[in-house]
Each structure stands twice: as structure tokens, then as C-alpha cells.
């Protein structure tokens, strides 16, 4: 047997809750409530089918109740009637109908058994009728309490669950109703879990959007920071080079020039490290791999340190030629940062030993100093950004704690490793950088080596006066014929009757930007052999491929060094 309760929302049936139970449960209920063999008790559902009967239930269960019974009880909630049982026995019966379920409980007694007591005493008949009515009401109440109320509660729960409201689990002595309540419990837990997962998903999406927005804002900030700091640094750096070449060689002025050069270089390296660590962290750093002699690169770097002024620890180099596939700029940063780190913590009377070696498939750079050393517990954290050894109050060793973090990230990009070790405070330190080794190429790398530079005609297109003038003076002191323009229009006028061999173009020109200007030059056959170099304050290499597509032969990141300018001029093809 079953009972169905519709869940209606906004006048529409959304779903139906069905409770099924065995007819034997009602039969047991009739017997438990005292219907003995002398009585015929039945429960009839709202369709008129017999749901339970205490006499011959196996024969009549599920059959339609007699038409006379249905007609006599139609439209009535309770009463007493005469009728004939399904066995054809005349009887007197009392009935009661549930308002909620529409089911009818009837209990009757054969007239042959009922009339004798009535003839004996009219009052006894009244008592029997009253008992029958009480029994019907009691049975109806039990059905209402055990089935009707729980079904109503479950129907309400269906609507509450759809609205997301809490539900109640009604008690019942009917097993099927209890099982339905347990099913609701499971459904409620599943719904809570689903809503919890949905909340977590929405929160994760919100965090992801916030993170993406923060990353975009960070990229814009880094780009603006790079541009705004590199432009003045470029002008200062070029001016210092001019003063070093053309200015006084002795006295306080020369000392001040050397100080400005050192501090400008320091600011440039700090800016490079800060931006490069951010790029590497967010996967924005790109590499331009080429065959390199690691020993030669280290040797050139040490020569630059030795050429500097001021006391510092003794630098020595040991090893052999070892070739690798690496980005020249990034590998140079690794060498400089490892040496800078050693110099910071090694007194002028100390020594730093640099060794380049190759073993098997690995090329290894080792930097060993006899300086301050470090506690062992610091080593595992030393390659994190902004992590430093303990500083004195005067911060004489300075820095942002970015150098070794950048070394680790560059090592990862080259599929290499970097490690540090120290025997403790006062016992120096050793850093080992390794990356995959390759065979030496057929033609050796002779970059930076050659005959004296020949004077060449050069055009500088730069809208910032300080940057433009400082670069022009530096190139002229190097012996070149240099002309300058503030925008693309001025440069075109100069190019009408003059042909340079090298053109420096700032990418951020007003009006027609540097990229469009370079594209237009490459479209003219007369400029096909001119070497065009981009001037940029953005240090990243993410747009290098786009520059090559436009027609640039290279780029010069501000601030540029005298050596970088010399290298660009040396790379020019020979004149016919």
C-alpha cells in the first residue's frame, strides 16, 4: 500500500512524496486495537479499495468495497449504518473517515449477534454503538498520528528542502515512515554537503579572480616602476660614462664620479633583481639560449670586478673551458650575484676562490669565500626572496636579500641547481651552481674580442632630452658620428640625405611609436642593411620575439653600459 503527498510551490506540483507500507501492518493494527473474531473491521482507502480487514484479508484485500457501503458513507465523516458484508452477512457497522487521508475505518457486527442484545436491552445496544464509534475514532486517530501527521511533516520537509530551510524529522511507530525519515536525513546531509561545496567553489573562484586582478595590477606596477626608474638611471649612467672619459682624472671630482658610477650600477642591479624575481615568480621570465663558454663568461666578469676601484677581497679563478646552453644575460646575473654575495661577507684582507669545472653531463661553478660564514639553520632559507643573513645595525652589507633568490630561479629555468654550505659563523661559505653541460661548438665564442672599433654614423631617436643627450655625448666620445631626433618625424627628415649604419629607437616615442617607426623603415629597401636597436626601459624579454618580427636587430635596456654599446657597434657587419 502507499500514500502520496504532492509538494506544491507557486501553484505547481514540483514533486510527490510517496510512503509505502505493507498491508499486514494495518491488519496487525486492527487486531492490536481489539477487533476479535465476532467483529468485521475494515480500512478503506480514498479510492474505495480495501486496505486492511481482520476477516479473510487474503481474499478481500485490494478489492473494491461494496457499492452500498461506499454510497452510505459518501460525504460523511462518521456514522452508523446497516449493510451487508462481503460474505453476504447482514450487519450493523460504525464508520469514521480521516479528513487528511480520506481513508475510512469501519467496524461492524452481524445483525444476528447484534439484535439479541438489543432485544434484551436497548441501552446495551447504545453502549455497543458508542464503543464502536469510539473504536473507529481511536483507530482513525492512531492512523492520523502514525501515518497522517508524519506524511504531512514529510510533505512540508520537501518544500522546506527546496527553499533551503531546515527540516524536521517526525517520530512514528510505522516502520516505513521511520525509514522515510532516515532517507530524509541522508538527503539533508547530502544537500548540506552540496551547498558547502558550492560555497567553497564560489569562494575559490572569487579568490582566483582577486588573484588574477592582483597579478595584473602587479604587472602594471612593475612595468611602470621599470620604465620610470630605468629612464633616469640611463641618463645618469650615460653621463657618468661621459664624465669618466672626458672629465678630470684626479682629485675629488674624479672620486665623486666613481662614487656615482658605483651607486648607479648598484641601483641598476637592485632594480634588475627586484623585477626579475617578480617575473620568475609569476612565470614571466623568458630565456634566449645560446652556446656559452662558462669559464670565459666568469673570467670576463672577474676582470670587470678587478677593474673597479676600492678595497675588496682577492678574487682568483681556476678551472677549464666548459660549454653550456644558457641565456647570457641571466647566466651573467648568476655569476655577479654569487660574487657580490661573497664580497659582502668577506673582508678586504680575505680571499674568494671561483672555480669552473665540468664532470659528466654537468657544468659547475663554485664560489668559496673565507668570510663571515653563516649558521647551518639559515642555509635552507637562504634562497628565499628577502631572506638575509643577520645584519649589523649599520647595515654595512646592505642588499634586499634578492640575489640568491634570483640565482635559484634562474637555475630552475636552466634545469640546474644551486646549493650553499658553511661550517658555521666565521668559517666562510661555499655556493655551487650546476647546469647541464654541452659539447663545444665548431666555432668558438669570441664575443668581446676584436680589433679597435671603427667610427660609424649613428642616429639616436629618443624623446627624453636627458637620456638622448647623455647617450649622444657617450657615443661621440667613443669616436662615432652621432645625430639625434626627438621623434619619428624629425628622424625622417634627417634620413632623407643621410644614411646611418646604426639607429637607436626608443619604443615609447610620442605620436608614432618606436615599433611603427621601425616597421616603416624596414619597408624601405634603402634601410635594409641598417642595424636597428630598440631603446627600452622595460627589462623583461617577453616581447623580444615581437621586436624581431617588426625588424629590430636587438634591444638596449636602460641604463646601458659602455661595454654594451661597444658590443653593439662591434656586431655591425663590415662595410663593403
Image (tube, helix red, strand yellow):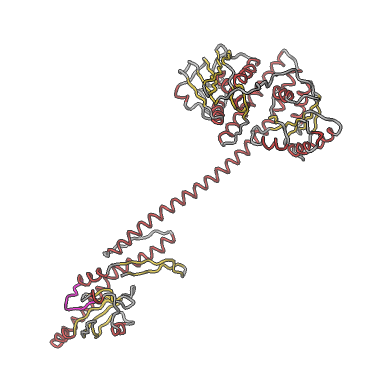
Q: Is residue 35 above or below residue 412?
A: below
Q: Going by the image, does 394 lie left or right of 482? A: left
| Looking at the image, residue 511 lies above or below residue 272 | below
Q: Classify 341 as above or below 165.
A: above
Q: Quadrant of the C terminus?
A: top right
Residue 107: x percent and y percent? 23, 78
- 459 to the left or right of 374: right
Look at 27% across and 72% down and name the residue there: 141
Residue 546 or residue 467, whichever sits in front? 546
Residue at image point 28% right, 74% down: 51
Task: Name, please, the residue furthest toward the left.
Answer: 120
Q: Position of residue 549 (x, y in %)?
A: 70, 37
Q: How many marks?
A: 0
Q: Nearer the viewer, residue 282 or 345?
A: 282
Give the image location of residue 80, x and y in percent.
25, 83
Q: Residue furthest front?
A: 442
Whether residue 89 is visible, yes or no, is yes
Residue plotted at (48% across, 15% down): 427
Q: Is residue 294 left or right of residue 529?
A: left
Whether residue 122 is visible: no
What predominant SS class does the magenta segment belong to?
Answer: loop
- The quarter holding residue 554 reads top right
328 or 281, which lies in front? 328
Look at the image and tell me in which quarter the N terminus lies: bottom left
At horizontal 48% and vertical 21% (from top left) the residue drawn is 421
**Residue 567 magenta-highlighted:** no
- Identify the residue at the far top of this view: 349
In percent of width and height, residue 528 lies at 78, 33
The residue sitting at the bottom extreme is 119
Q: Is 246 located above or below residue 131 in the figure? A: above
**What range is drawn magenta here?**
33-41
Amino acid at each position: 500500500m502507499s500514500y502520496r503527498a504532492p509538494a506544491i510551490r507557486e501553484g505547481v506540483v514540483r514533486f510527490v512524496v510517496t510512503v509505502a507500507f505493507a498491508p499486514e501492518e494495518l491488519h496487525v493494527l486492527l487486531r492490536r486495537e481489539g477487533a476479535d473474531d465476532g467483529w468485521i473491521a475494515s480500512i478503506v482507502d480514498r479510492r474505495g479499495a480495501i486496505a486492511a480487514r481482520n476477516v479473510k484479508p487474503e481474499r478481500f484485500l485490494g478489492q473494491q468495497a461494496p457499492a452500498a457501503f461506499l454510497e452510505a458513507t459518501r460525504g460523511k465523516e462518521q456514522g452508523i449504518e446497516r449493510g451487508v458484508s462481503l460474505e453476504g452477512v447482514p450487519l450493523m457497522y460504525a464508520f469514521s473517515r480521516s479528513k487528511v487521508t480520506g481513508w475510512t475505518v469501519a467496524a461492524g457486527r452481524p445483525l444476528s449477534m447484534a439484535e439479541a442484545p438489543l432485544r434484551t436491552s436497548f441501552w446495551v445496544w447504545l453502549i455497543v454503538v458508542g464503543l464502536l464509534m469510539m473504536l473507529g475514532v481511536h483507530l482513525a486517530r492512531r492512523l492520523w498520528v502514525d501515518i497522517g501527521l508524519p506524511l504531512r511533516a514529510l510533505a512540508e520537509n520537501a518544500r522546506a528542502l527546496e527553499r533551503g530551510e531546515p527540516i524536521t524529522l517526525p517520530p512514528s511507530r510505522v516502520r516505513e515512515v521511520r525509514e522515510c525519515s532516515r532517507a530524509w536525513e541522508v538527503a539533508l546531509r547530502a544537500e548540506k554537503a552540496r551547498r558547502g561545496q558550492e560555497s567553497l567553489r564560489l569562494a575559490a573562484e572569487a579568490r582566483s579572480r582577486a588573484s588574477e586582478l592582483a597579478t595584473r595590477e602587479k604587472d602594471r606596477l612593475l612595468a611602470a616602476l621599470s620604465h620610470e626608474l630605468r629612464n633616469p638611471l640611463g641618463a645618469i649612467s650615460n653621463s657618468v660614462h661621459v664624465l669618466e672619459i672626458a672629465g678630470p682624472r684626479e682629485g675629488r671630482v674624479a672620486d665623486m664620479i666613481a662614487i656615482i658610477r658605483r651607486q648607479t650600477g648598484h641601483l641598476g642591479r637592485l632594480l634588475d633583481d627586484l623585477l626579475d624575481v617578480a617575473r620568475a615568480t609569476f612565470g614571466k621570465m623568458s630565456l634566449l639560449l645560446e652556446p656559452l663558454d662558462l669559464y670565459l663568461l666568469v673570467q670576463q666578469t672577474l676582470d670587470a670586478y678587478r677593474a673597479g676601484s676600492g678595497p675588496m677581497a682577492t678574487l682568483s679563478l681556476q678551472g677549464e673551458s666548459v660549454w653550456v646552453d644558457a641565456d647570457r644575460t641571466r647566466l651573467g646575473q648568476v655569476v655577479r650575484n654569487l660574487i657580490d654575495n661573497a664580497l659582502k661577507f668577506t673582508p678586504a684582507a680575505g680571499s674568494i676562490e671561483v672555480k669552473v669545472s665540468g664532470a659528466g653531463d654537468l657544468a659547475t661553478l663554485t664560489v668559496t669565500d673565507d668570510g663571515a660564514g653563516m649558521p647551518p639553520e639559515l642555509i635552507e632559507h637562504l634562497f628565499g626572496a628577502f631572506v638575509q643573513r643577520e645584519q649589523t645595525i649599520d647595515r654595512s652589507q646592505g642588499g634586499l636579500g634578492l640575489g640568491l633568490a634570483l640565482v635559484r630561479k634562474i637555475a630552475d629555468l636552466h634545469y640546474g641547481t644551486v646549493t650553499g654550505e658553511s661550517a658555521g659563523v666565521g668559517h666562510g661559505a661555499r655556493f655551487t651552481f650546476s647546469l647541464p653541460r654541452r659539447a663545444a661548438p665548431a666555432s668558438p665564442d669570441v664575443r668581446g674580442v676584436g680589433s679597435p672599433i671603427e667610427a660609424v654614423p649613428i642616429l639616436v631617436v629618443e624623446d627624453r632630452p636627458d637620456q638622448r643627450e647623455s647617450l649622444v655625448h657617450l657615443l661621440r666620445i667613443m669616436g662615432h658620428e652621432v645625430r639625434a631626433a626627438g621623434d619619428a618625424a624629425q628622424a625622417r627628415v634627417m634620413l632623407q640625405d643621410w644614411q646611418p649604419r646604426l639607429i637607436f629607437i626608443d619604443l615609447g616615442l610620442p605620436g608614432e611609436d618606436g615599433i611603427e617607426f621601425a616597421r616603416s623603415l624596414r619597408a624601405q629597401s634603402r634601410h635594409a642593411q641598417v642595424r636597428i636597436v630598440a631603446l627600452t626601459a622595460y627589462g623583461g624579454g617577453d616581447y623580444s620575439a615581437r621586436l624581431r618580427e617588426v625588424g629590430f636587430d636587438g634591444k638596449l635596456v636602460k641604463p646601458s653600459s659602455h661595454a654594451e654599446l661597444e658590443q653593439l657597434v662591434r656586431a655591425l657587419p663590415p662595410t663593403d
